[in-house]
Image (spheres, rainbow, N blue to C red):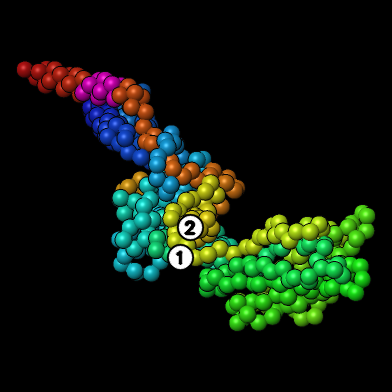
């Protein structure tokens, strides 16, 4: 009984060390695989109760575990959609084949890094067929509140490289100096004109024409002007007319004193703005506050548009896409505007090492890993997302080669035990002779 238990223990040792060698071989083979997680084989002794004072060898049993929570070093790349997770958390991905089949919501898989590029349909996809998943943004660039304990809100990140975009103009600011000499009784009374371009709701260019007409008094100076606003998007119709007076006091000379509307929205002294209706809708125009010199002024003898500004962007073509540290996917256009189109969350689980390991360095949640939660990158326990980066293999080749030598010696020793047991059994057989 004791000799046979020694034989069984030796066989168990060979099997356990063979398993360890298999994991070492896998680790070394994937030492250059981006995002690879090292497999570790552990040995556990088995004890068999031995009645009568004799000892029976129980042998050894091996278990293997993929250390998904171990991270490899990050290296920089030149692709803005090469992504890696720095810290805790995993990127949600899905199989490109499953998405192409169009069979409902694709199954969420998880990975820690990937080199994503647009495919023929515009999906951000790796060469191994993994599509990046994220929450789609609304038209105004905000991300709705999606459920965090399910993947139902996630969609494949799709980039339309032929997309064009623009923003309508809703605000403009007029910083203009009017010549004080033109409101004198002996002036010619010439009008001053200014045209400001804006973009309508369809991205087309239109203009607000601003005419300043001085009031000529019989004597002295009136310091009064009439501002007439015409909109080319409304057939050059007058959309606003305002009478403005300027103070000639020593402390605030040349600044607005009063603004009276004839047509158009009323002047708001608290903000220094008026609102007129152009062809594309309401337009807020900042002409400056009473007593301030940050808008319309009346000084000296020159007409000078000092600062004219407006919001709105003309229609432009998408040029590139980047993902920031918080997982916000932004599209950049050649007109200089940036739009938020998706947000990629980071998925966290209580026991990442309990997930089911699949091909292409992907993993699937399981009962052993616990329930997952989708966090904003950089929030909660998760790390952040690094673009222009890949995660290298977590394999330490030097350590694996050292473990291989140890495994080889242990395997040889167990083989020697079997050989010794065989010789002892041979001696037992020879007793009969």
List the residue tagged with mark 1.
164
- Residue 41 in picture, x, y percent from top left: 35, 33
Picture residue at 54% right of the left edge, 43% below the top:
383
Q: Is residue 91 above or below residue 155?
A: above
| Image quadrant assignment for residue 147 | bottom right
**Label 2 with label 1: CB-CB less than 8 Å:** yes
- Residue 280 in picture, x, y percent from top left: 60, 76
Q: Earlier in the sequence, mark 2 or mark 1?
A: 1
- Considering the numbered disc 2 on the image, is that residue within a helix, a strand or a loop? strand
List the residue tagged with mark 2.
333
- Residue 375 in picture, x, y percent from top left: 55, 52
Per the rendered image, the range of residues in magenta is 403-415
Q: Is residue 20 above or below residue 359?
A: above
- Taking the image as shown, residue 150 lies to the left or right of residue 162, namely right
11 within the magenta span:
no
Picture residue at 30% right of the left edge, 50% below the top:
127
Q: Is residue 327 visible?
A: yes
């Amino acid at each position: 009984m004791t000799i046979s238990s020694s034989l069984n223990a030796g066989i168990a040792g060979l099997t356990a060390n063979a398993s360890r060698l298999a994991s070492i071989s896998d680790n070394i083979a994937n030492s250059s695989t981006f995002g690879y997680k090292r497999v570790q084989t552990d040995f556990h002794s088995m004890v068999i109760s031995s009645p009568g004072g004799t000892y029976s060898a129980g042998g050894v049993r091996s278990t293997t575990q993929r250390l998904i929570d171990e991270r490899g070093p990050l290296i920089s790349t030149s692709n803005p959609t090469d992504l890696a997770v720095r810290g805790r958390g995993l990127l949600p991905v899905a199989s490109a084949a499953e998405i192409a089949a169009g069979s409902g919501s694709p199954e969420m898989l998880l990975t820690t890094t990937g080199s994503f590029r647009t495919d023929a349909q515009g999906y951000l996809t790796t060469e191994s067929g993994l599509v990046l998943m994220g929450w789609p943004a609304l038209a105004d660039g905000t991300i709705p509140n999606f459920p965090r304990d399910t993947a139902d809100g996630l969609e494949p990140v799709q980039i339309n490289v032929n997309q064009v975009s623009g923003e309508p103009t809703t605000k403009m600011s007029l910083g203009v100096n009017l010549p004080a000499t033109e409101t004198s009784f002996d002036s010619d009374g010439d009008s001053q004109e200014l045209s400001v371009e804006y973009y309508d709701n369809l991205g087309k260019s239109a203009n607000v024409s601003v005419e300043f007409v001085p009031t000529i008094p019989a004597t002295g100076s009136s310091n009064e002007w009439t501002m007439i606003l015409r909109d080319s998007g409304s057939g050059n119709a007058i959309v606003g007319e305002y009478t403005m007076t300027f103070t000639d006091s020593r402390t605030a000379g040349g600044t607005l004193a009063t603004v009276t509307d004839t047509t158009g929205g009323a002047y708001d002294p608290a903000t220094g703005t008026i609102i007129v209706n152009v062809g594309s809708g309401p337009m807020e125009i900042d002409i400056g506050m009473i007593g301030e010199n940050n808008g319309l002024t009346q000084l000296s003898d020159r007409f000078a548009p000092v600062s004219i500004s407006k919001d709105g962007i003309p229609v432009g073509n998408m040029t590139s896409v980047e993902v920031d540290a918080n997982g916000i996917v932004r599209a950049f256009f050649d007109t200089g505007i940036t739009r938020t189109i998706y947000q990629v969350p980071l998925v966290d689980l209580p026991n990442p090492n309990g997930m089911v390991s699949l091909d292409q360095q992907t993993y699937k949640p399981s009962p052993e890993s616990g329930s997952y939660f989708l966090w904003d990158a950089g929030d909660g326990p998760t790390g952040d997302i690094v673009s222009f980066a890949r995660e290298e293999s977590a394999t330490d080749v030097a350590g694996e080669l050292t473990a291989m030598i140890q495994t080889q010696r242990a395997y040889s020793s167990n083989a020697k035990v079997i050989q010794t047991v065989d010789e002892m059994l041979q001696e037992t057989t020879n007793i009969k002779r």
